[in-house]
Amino acid sequence: MQPATLPQIKKALGEMTQPELVALCLKVAKYKKDNKELMTYLLFEAEDEAGYIKAVNEEVKEIFSEINRWSGYQAKKTVRKGLRIANKYIKYSPASGTDIEILINFCLLLKKAPMIIRNSQTVINIYDRQLVRINKSIAKLHEDLQYDYTQLLEESGLVE
């Protein structure tokens, strides 16, 4: 089965009545957790971006608190899980600074992690890739915002 293009979907949605749209949205949300999370963001959390960022940072922090300090392999898996969750929530938000703030928080948590993790080359590579990603996102912003986020990076100690 070939999926319809976005213009075709847009046209079909434009021809539907409001109750039909509601039923369709509920059906889409029912089948996949990601769809339900995206709808939750769009309906309830998009208005309060700062609160959304704080909630995501708390969830990532909670995952980091579960790090196994005695097994390097398990610790790396936990770091990857935290990054996967951060990336999932970053893709929901179209706001330009959300990804930067969430990734800065992730890098700070990674920097404060137990020694067993910080000595792992895999984790060092993850950390370095996130710093590159932060810098690329900052470069896409307006000059004033670039300055603000660069200051935030320097204050957090992630960049020398």
Image (tube, rainbow, N blue to C red):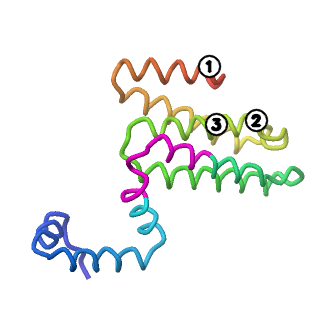
Q: Quadrant of residue 54?
A: top right
Q: Tell me: residue 56, above or below residue 43.
A: above
Residue range in magenta is 41-57
* Amino acid marked by disc 2: Lys
Residue at label 2? 112
Q: How many marks?
A: 3
Discs 1/3, front: 1
* Amino acid marked by disc 3: Cys
Closer-to-camera residue (86/25): 25
Closer-to-camera residue (47/120): 47
Classed neighbour count for the residue bearing mark 1: other residues with Cα under 10 Å, few (<14), some (14–19), many (≥20): few
Residue depicted at 39% across the width and 50% down the height: 46
Q: Tell me: residue 81, above or below residue 119.
A: below
Give the mark nearer the N terminus: 2 vs 1. 2
* Amino acid marked by disc 1: Glu
Classed neighbour count for the residue bearing mark 3: other residues with Cα under 10 Å, few (<14), some (14–19), many (≥20): many
Residue 53 located within the stretch drawn in magenta:
yes
- Label disc, if present, on residue 155 of the rendered structure: 1
Residue 33 located within the stretch drawn in magenta:
no
- The residue tagged with tag 2: helix, strand or loop? loop
Residue at label 3? 107
Residue depicted at 62% across the width and 19% down the height: 155
Alpha-carbon span between mark 2 and mark 3: 9 Å
Q: Position of residue 22 (x, y in %)?
A: 27, 75
Give the mark nearer the N terminus: 1 vs 3. 3
Q: Quadrant of residue 125?
A: top right
Alpha-carbon span between mark 1 and mark 3: 13 Å
**Please, what is the dominant secondary structure of the magenta stretch?**
helix
Residue depicted at 43% across the width and 52% down the height: 45
